[in-house]
Image (tube, coloured by chain):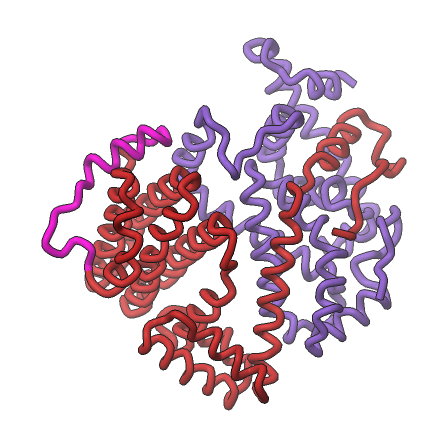
Amino acid sequence: MVIQDRPRPGDVTLAGPAITALVASARDGDVAAFCELYRAFAPRVYRFCRSRVAQSSDAEDLTQQTFLRVVEALPRYQDRGLPFGAWLFRIARNQVIDLDRRRRDYVDLDELARRGDEPTAGNRPDDAGDDRDTLLRAMARLTRDQRDVLGYRFFADLSARETGRLMGRDEATVRGLQARAIAALRRTLDADTLGRKRVANAAPIVTAAVRG
Amino acid sequence: MSGPQVSAPPPELAADPLERLLLQLAARSGPAPGVMEAIERRAVAAFEARSRATSGAGGNSRRARARVRGGRPFRQALAAGLAAAAILVGGGAVASAGSAPGRPLFAVRLAVEQALLPADPPSDRLTAQLAVLDRRLSEAAEAAPDSGAVADATRAYRATLADLLPLVHRAPEQAEVVVRSLIRQLASIDRLDAEVTPAARDDLDDAARAARWVLATIDRGDWADRSASTSRSTSRRRPTAGRPLPTRSVSSSAGASSGSAGRC
């Protein structure tokens, strides 16, 4: 069975007959169906997780934990108004929240570890590193709903309708929430990146984006 | 990987420069090559093991049980066997409800968990084992008022610790990662100490001593000497028996490498 390629805005790719059929087959133990489901959702789950954690290794762990939870819970899954994809992303979101909760108490140690001079396997440098760090720090100050909507819309590549279904809200509400999230992100970046003390160190791409 | 990829941004999201930036960063936030395939292999292995466990008949399930038992101590294998039988009789749903520390099926969950860890490369297995250690401490924290459950979780924590040194021997470039994780875990154990009942504190102390012992061994760089015997010794007796642990020097030297001196 072939899953449609990249989702288009307005499509409901979290559900649909193909996904429903794959889920039914996977529940019957069909490995190929499970693989199709994995390939349909895993990249977007990874990027959603990546939007919420500072290190790629954490996003990898969260993606893996999400799918292990799916394996564990799939026999009990029933579509009672919550499509499979929405159910899966809720698992991913819960994994992110659990990690956040576990790390909150010892954030100082994590922060210290991240400041190490030598890059580690879980902390790969890349061109987007500075911008991403700046954005992630700013996103971390948004409300949970705002972070969710940005993660779903921009990183998980979900449409407004899909995001609404996932968050239990209608499409218009999601668009409003997204607009407020972007505005709040801009204010945060503006304060952080363009502040007098830090303007000299501001990541150039972020600065340009904030200035519009 | 043939899954959907982020390509050109949808027009509705590309109007604002900040939205464009988010999309650009999202497009560059993909996993490193091979990561999704590695996760897929583990997820599929878990899926297959789960399918075999719930179908519960024929040669496949026998092979799955043998795999689950492989390399584990006899008592654990026996417990796993008995618990697997309980699953087959009582249905798979029992497993998730009764597999928390202190519950009868905890042993089988541990065995399945170990069976599902990636065998190779060693760095992958090491990463997975560190995640397992974190999980054990989370379980101990969740079960804090129940001293029996805390004991179960911390015993399992120590058993998993025993597997670290052989893996560090095989993947020495990961030693720094292990040190950081253990320092973090020691801080967690320290916090947990205030939450558990007095009866569970000894178990936590044992776990902390075992973690410090592993840290000390890595700190000295002699995991190659220890790795052959650790898997037998650390999991079955207190690593502190008969010798003092160099707690202070471990903390300071490990802290020097990760910038967290004095935290543990």
Magenta stretch contains residue B141: no
> Residue shown at 62%/35% (left/top)?
A142
Name the side, left or right, on which A109 lies relative to B3.
left
Q: How many marks?
A: 0
Q: Is residue A77 left or right of residue A173?
A: left
x, y percentage for residue B107? 39, 73
Measuring from the top left, give residue A40's x and y in whole percent: 76, 56
Give the image location of residue B222, x and y in percent.
Answer: 27, 43
Q: Which residues are magenta?
A: B238-261
Comparing B42 with B225, the one in front is: B225
Residue B136 screen position, x and y as percent: 39, 59
**Residue A15 position by quadrant:** bottom right
Between B58 and B179, the one lying in front of the other is B58
Looking at this view, name the residue that lies furthest to the left.
B242
Whether the magenta-drawn stretch holds residue B255 is answered as yes
Examine the image and state in which quarter residue B141 appears: bottom left
Quadrant position of the C terminus of chain B in the picture: top left
| Residue for point 64% across, 41% down | B32
Question: Which corner quadrant of the image does residue B69 belong to?
Answer: bottom left
- From the viewer's side, name the closer residue of B186 and B217: B217
Point 24% across, 65% down: residue: B236
The colour one sees for chain A in the rendered image is purple
User: According to the rendering, which colour does chain B have?
Assistant: red
